[in-house]
Image (tube, helix red, strand yellow):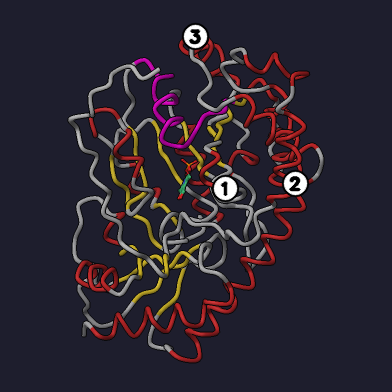
Amino acid sequence: LPYTEKTPSIQLKAKSTVNIKYDFSPAKIDEESFPFLVWRKIAKELIDESNSSLLQSGHPQGEIELRTQIARYLYESRGIICDAEQIVIGSGTEQLLPMILRLFDHTPRLALENPGYSPIPRVHLQNQAIPIAVDDEGIQVDQLEQTDAKLVYITPSHQFPTGAILSAARRTHLLSWAMADQGRYIIEDDYDSEFRYIGKPIPALQSIDKAERVIYMSTFSKSFMPSLRVAYFILPHSLITKYKAVFSYYACTVPRFDQQMLSEFMLQGYFSKHLNRMRKIYRRKHDKILSIFEKNYPEVTISGDMAGMHMLISFKHSLDEQLIKEHLLKKHIRIQPLSQYTINKKENTNPSFILGFGGIPYAEIDQAIHQLMNAIYETT
Ligand SMILES: Cc1ncc(COP(=O)(O)O)c(C=O)c1O
């Protein structure tokens, strides 16, 4: 029965949408290769009366089955040794990072990469994050040493957004920074390490840290789908007691059925099959983009393309990044300028854009890049 017969007085306005033809956003994944068939089969099996216990609240850290699968996967793919008890599942990096910060008695000073992943400075309470510059070897650890930071958030396997890979020397330096003081920890965000195109796989910092100073975090947003909202962190043993004291009453933010589906997907070997398939698909896209630039736009510098689902394109002459972004939107193309991810924005001497290629279908790459470049050059 309707609660009221009155017509609602609030008129919902239709959202104005920009029609985007080519979206180079780094958060997009390939839609054509999603394993709908298998995912539907697992959902059908799980959503059944025999699993009625899943209607009740679950473990605050997430389903033990999923945590066990994550621990096994990380051991096999990243050399990470941890057990399910150390893993906490949550619905995203933005939801998990504030939880990590709450494990410390006084909100610790957090240092972060600049440019860097934009939600991070925003989730830090009181907005007091300390920006540390990044170069082609990753975060500049000697700058970090000059600060009073207790925590540092980094993306060492593929710096977001520049794509730099933290060099071996910097890794050692960073671990020694953490060990030099009792309360120092490194938060390692390994968000897209599944996809590496050039060179040997880079070990996770967590796997070479002998002093338990790394809080490892990762997500299924790149490797599977961003709308699933499943991410996790691994706590060093020294922080588990504190975690249990602060968060035992928290409900896990990911629905239990979704967690169980993902766990089955991993257990039955579909996740590793999916990753192998996606590696080929993204590598093909990656190689195609590089060859288009090499042949047609040799004046554009490409960097950060060793891994992941985005690369950086930079121009030598002066261009207004914001003006280009707006002009491109009028042409139904979305691309983010590097300055969007920079704290204390200053003009980039080499205007740069993050070219995410996950969401561009392979067959449309040629057209997409040419239309992008034509539109950029129209502004000069
Ligand atoms: C550096 C970085 N971390 C994490 C994520 C994913 O976060 P979430 O798990 O909240 O989807 C992204 C997504 O683009 C990212 O760029």
Tell me the distance, in whole angstroms, between the alpha carbons under discs 2 and 3. 34 Å
Image quarter (top left, top right, bottom left or bottom right) of the N terminus: top left
Frontmost of labels 1 and 3 is 1
Task: Give the residue number, with chain letter if any, for mark 3.
Answer: 249
Taking depth in this image into account, of 69 and 202 the one nearest to the observer is 69
In the image, what residue occupies the spot 44% across and 79% down?
Answer: 369
Ranked by sequence position, the earlier of labels 1 and 3 is 1
Task: Give 263 or 209, whichever is nearer the viewer.
Answer: 263
Q: Is residue 278 magenta?
A: no
What's the distance in space between the residues labelled 1 and 3, CA to CA? 28 Å
Residues drawn in magenta: 88-105
| Residue 7, position as x, y percentages in the image | 23, 29
Q: Which residue is mark 1?
A: 225
Q: Secondary structure at mark 2?
A: helix
Q: CA distance from mark 2 to mark 1?
A: 14 Å
Q: Nearer the viewer, mark 2 or mark 1?
A: 2
233 shown above or below 273: above
**The image quarter in which residue 320 lies:** bottom left
Q: How many marks?
A: 3
Which element carries disc 3, helix, strand or loop? loop
Q: Residues within 10 Å of mark 1 (few under 14, many from 20)?
A: some
Type of the residue with mark 3: Tyr
Q: Residue 214 location, x and y as percent?
A: 54, 34
Give left or right: position of 114 versus 231.
left
Q: Is residue 284 above or below residue 101?
A: below
- List the residue tagged with mark 2: 38
Residue type, mark 2 in image: Val
